[in-house]
Image (cartoon, rainbow, N blue to C red):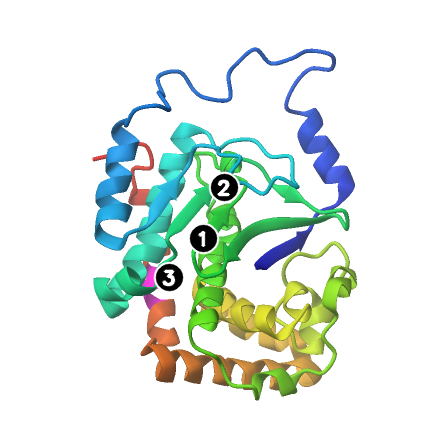
Amino acid sequence: MNKIYYLIMAFTTLVSFVSCGNDGELDSKSIFPDGVDTSTQNDFDRWVLNNYTYPYNIQFEYRYSDKEAHVEYNVVPAEYDKSIAVAKLVKHLWVDAYNELLGRDFLRQYSPRMIQLIGSSEYKEDMSEVLGTAEGGMKIFLNKVNLLDIENPDLGLIKYYFIKTMFHEFGHILQQTKDYSTDFKTISTDYQGPSWVNVGAYETMGSSEALKMGYISAYASSEPGEDFVEILSFYVVYGKPYWEKMLELAGDSGSPKLLKKFALVKEYLSTKWSIDIDELEKIVQRRMGDISELDLESLD
């Protein structure tokens, strides 16, 4: 199992939960919105069948299930309307991006069998946050769906919590299917393991300490497999200008390592998967510009 862990300050977490309700009062509103019958198909279920299941054999689950969830965490279900929005965003920025580059047969063969939405975060004892999970090439979890504001979608939030997670976790599926060069693991010799949370403490992106060590993010310093897919996902989702800015911040100590790693990621994707990472980046960045035109509520 590969997981994305991002550092969250306890104070921020506490404030978030306090703001959700009044002290001493229980919310009488059901976690399942009115009009959603979990025992029969609704319009969204039919949309999922036509856009995920039938064409790609992907089971897109938004209803909470103890069987599918990670029972070691306390989580809440994804809200119905926000699940629709995330499903449309993932289709536009991940499914359709790969389709545009490689055609539908690629995801038909290699896509995860399930995408499971969770409304809240999964927090670990070390105060890190699980944004997503890829399990054995079969299932991808997307957490924190309820954070999305449909009326005023925040592109930064969409990138960070959903689309980067999809590219990161799918990168693990590619790794699990075809091995990448062992040369990658020799570029950095100071992987931190669980202590990655101390690299640039409380910095989730653009950690200057991590960059100078030759890692695109603090989490990339945890182990080679995460390092590999962090480079892939950051480059594609945040774009080439962001990558070049990170190289500048990495300086003479970190940028040579980042460039060597990127070269191996690029070669791997090209030779093993016929994926041109530069073309994929262009496609995703163009599609990012279309988000304001998307109707995240309609199922037409």
Which of 177 and 4 lies nearest the eye of the viewer? Answer: 177
Tell which circle, 2 or 1, labels the residue nearer the N-terminal end: 2
Magenta-colored span: 282-286
Identify the image quadrant of the N terminus: bottom right
Q: In the rendered structure, are the residues bearing label 2 and label 1 in contact, judged by CB atoms less than 8 Å apart? A: yes
Tell which circle, 3 or 2, labels the residue nearer the N-terminal end: 2
Q: Is residue 105 left or right of residue 264?
A: left
Q: Which residue is mark 2?
A: 68
Say above or below: 295 vs 251: above
Where is residue 82? Give x, y as percent: 42, 33
Residue 290 appears anywhere in the view: no
Q: Is residue 284 magenta?
A: yes
Residue 85 appears anywhere in the view: yes
- Helix, strand or loop status at disc 3: helix
Which of 74 and 230 lies nearest the eye of the viewer? Answer: 74
Q: Is residue 243 left or right of residue 84?
A: right
Q: Amino acid at mark 3?
A: Gln
Say above or below: 170 vs 30: below
Between disc 3 and disc 2, the foreground one is 2
Where is residue 61? Give x, y as percent: 40, 39
Image quarter of residue 73: top right
Q: Which residue is mark 1?
A: 139
Q: Amino acid at mark 1?
A: Lys
Identify the image quadrant of the C terminus: top left
How far apart, in angstroms, are the residues tagged by discs 3 and 2? 32 Å
Q: Which residue is mark 3?
A: 285
Total residue callouts: 3
